[in-house]
Image (cartoon, rainbow, N blue to C red):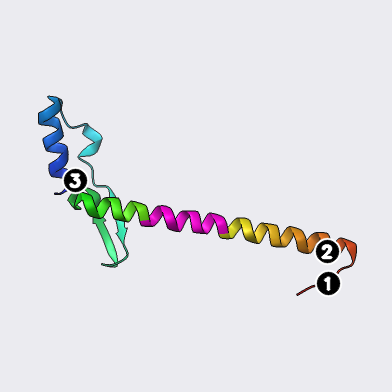
Amino acid sequence: MKVKKLLEIQSVIEERKIPCDMTDEFKYWSRSKGEWVNILDMDLVHVVRALNLESKLEVGQYHNKNIQKIKDFIKAMEAEDGIERD
């Protein structure tokens, strides 16, 4: 079911209007389609999978940056001590 439809159902169940900022276009870069898609037009299952994938990629990038910082720090410390390693 599309996110837009789920928001409509939620508004009926909760007897509340859909928040005004939830009618905007929320863009997501679809890696599989190679184009921007509106999140509100995506199926909920796809949104969950996409969010999970993006989170894993973000954690991976964060991890790689930290590993590189540690390697650079060790290299700098070794250089100060006159130790050379490749």
Q: Label 3: few (<14), some or many (≥20) within 10 Å?
A: some
Distance of mark 3 from mark 1, alpha carbons? 56 Å
Helix, strand or loop under label 1: loop
Q: Label 2: few (<14), some or many (≥20) within 10 Å?
A: few
Residue type (three-letter) at the residue carrying disc 3: Val
- Tell me which numbered mark, 2 or 1, is placed earlier along the sequence: 2
Which x, y percent locates residue 1?
A: 14, 49
Q: Label 1: few (<14), some or many (≥20) within 10 Å?
A: few
Which residue in the structure is indicated by mark 1?
A: 84
Residue 19's place in the image compared with 34, above or below, is above
Residue type (three-letter) at the residue carrying disc 2: Glu
Q: Which residues are magenta?
A: 53-63
Helix, strand or loop under label 2: helix
* Count of numbered marks: 3
User: Magenta region, mostly helix, strand or loop?
Assistant: helix
Which residue in the structure is indicated by mark 3?
A: 3
Residue type (three-letter) at the residue carrying disc 1: Glu
Which x, y percent locates residue 75?
A: 77, 64
Asked if the residues shown at circle 2 and circle 1 are in contact, with their CB atoms under 8 angstroms apart, the answer is yes
* 71 is within the stretch colored magenta: no
Where residue 85 sits, quadrant-wise, is bottom right
Helix, strand or loop under label 3: helix
Which residue in the structure is indicated by mark 2?
A: 78
Question: Position of 72 compared to 57: left or right?
Answer: right
Residue at position x 54%, y 54% in the image: 62
- Tell me which numbered mark, 2 or 3, is placed earlier along the sequence: 3
Which x, y percent locates residue 11?
A: 14, 31
Residue at position x 25%, y 36% in the image: 21
